[in-house]
Image (tube, helix red, strand yellow):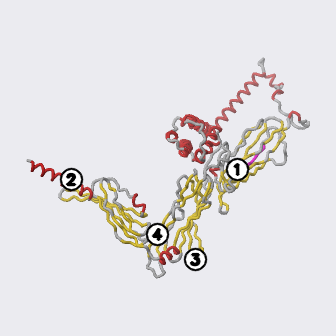
Amino acid sequence: MRYLKRLATALLVLVLILSAAYSQAQATATLSADVVSEFESVTLTVTDRSRDESDPDFSSLETDFEITQVSTSSSIQIVAGRVDSTRKWQLELMPKRTGAINIQPLIVGNSQTNSLTLRVNPISERERDYISRTAFFETIITPREQYPQAAIYVTRRMMYTSQARIPSMPQEKKLDIVDATVLPIGNRETLREVRNGIEYYVMQWRYVVFAEKSGTMRIPGENARVAIYGNQFRPQIRPIVAPEEAITILPIPDAYPRDEPWFPASSVGLTQSFEPTDTDTLNLGDALTRSIEVRARDSYQSALLPLELGSLEDVRIYPEQATMDSVLEGDRVWGTQSRSFNLVPVEPGRFVLPEFRLTWWNTETREVKVSTLPSATYNVPDPRGIQVPANDAQLFDPSSVALSSDLQNGISGIDAWVYVLAIAGLVGWILAFTLVYLNRDKLLKRFSAKSFLSQVDYGAIRHAFSHSDRSTLRHAVLHTVAQYLDVDLVTARRLFLNSAEGHQLLSQLDQLAYSTSTAEFDYDLKSIQQVIDSIVKNYGSDSEEFGLQSVLN
């Protein structure tokens, strides 16, 4: 009996050992070659015979290799009623260094592959020098240190000689950068350049980049495979690589006024004009048009602040729609904005158009600047003090309205003022219906916004608030308004700046996102919701329409 127990125990141990070995053998890895030369690729094949559907994790390979291509395949065989399932992954690997590279076991489901070793032999210095001079990438970045929302110019160039054959390159190439707005400057440019006595063909793509927050911004690299000919070497396919670049994005300086919205530029120009221009006197009810234009170098249209005049006593202000643009002059981008304001005095007297001020940060001299436009003074005479010539029509005075003798005779015992009031009421109703009809689109838009208000989802804001993430909170606030009003982020930002409560909230969010300051945040979740509710509710009554126009094509 004791002998049978020992035998059963031995068999159990053997089964466990064989099961473990079988489990380990479910995933295998092989290389197409054990030895390659520098710049040569090698194919790694991973085979999984288990029935686990999970994909392997290849991230450990990225330390020593660039994974240029991944392909997968699968097959199922049924032999004598037994199902044999096989999955394969083939990875084309480009070694990042020379010498012996150990490929550690890869995890595939519940099993792992065997380890491998690849030897990468360096090429000769003569061949290396020849390849490096025949084809290469270069990335030009100006400046390498910048502020949020200010321009960074990036040029990616591929340079090659007649001894190189390059792959087909696109006319337009995207440059994706995290937490940044990237605008392409035109399409691919083709040039020729002589450097160190060697004539090169040049293909370049230019971009202007605007970072959205301070910290380190990374310009992604890229690679291409080029055929190299000549110099007594057989034609070889070699990779050329543009390495990743790191740019420093500075925080909003402590010297910048906290009560002013952040506005960086390297130069700002303000101009204004008046219509009419030939007098400093206005008649009561006449319109004076004040037009203001701002041009900001190294800025763009979505970063420009709204042009506003504020309110004036005894003057009605009717602003026209602002015109915004981003233009390229030479090698620099300019954000431009112009807007006209129609000013109508409603009381006689003297009124002053105040000085227009724009606070901004000079990114080159690194100091606060204030650009101004001078004030203007106008006189509005009292029409009751004007002597009207006899041959001119008499000024209309509502208090002097009198019924004609014919009308008086047609009224049989009924007070004439009843008819006057009835006519005035009828005219009033006609005017009211006319105004409603002319503004029906705005009223419908406002009604839609109010109905829509109940559908606003504050989930993203609530999540950012609970995690105390400064940058994410700012993005969540803008994205919530943009998404639920179906507008872009530029319009959403301007809706905030056009509202007193929104302006204050966005200013504090800018400080939180762009500055290293530890200042207190004056808002809780409920107060943020109240500000957004107000913006959404009033959206339909906003007479301006905003839009991002891409002119850098």
Q: Earlier in the sequence, mark 3 or mark 1?
A: 3
Please rate how many residues cluster around mark 4, counting C-alpha atoms within 10 Å: few if below 14, some from 14 to 19, many from 20: some
Label 2, secondary structure: give it.
Answer: helix
Q: Quadrant of residue 64?
A: bottom left
**Separation of marks 4 and 3 at Cα, in angstroms:** 21 Å
**Separation of marks 2 and 4 at Cα, in angstroms:** 48 Å
Q: Which residue is disc 1 drawn over?
A: 368
**Separation of marks 3 and 2 at Cα, in angstroms:** 69 Å
Instruction: Answer whether residue 447 is visible to the viewer in this image.
Output: no
- The residue sitting at the bottom extreme is 232
Q: Which residue is disc 2 drawn over?
A: 16
Q: Residue at coordinates 80% horizontally, 35% vertically from top-left? A: 347
Query: Residue 408, position in %: x, y?
Result: 81, 23
Q: Which residue is disc 4 drawn over?
A: 239
Label 4, secondary structure: give it.
Answer: strand
Q: Earlier in the sequence, mark 1 or mark 2?
A: 2
Amino acid identity at mark 3: Glu
Instruction: Give the magenta part as a residue range.
Output: 288-293
**Separation of marks 3 and 1 at Cα, in angstroms:** 46 Å
Amino acid identity at mark 2: Leu
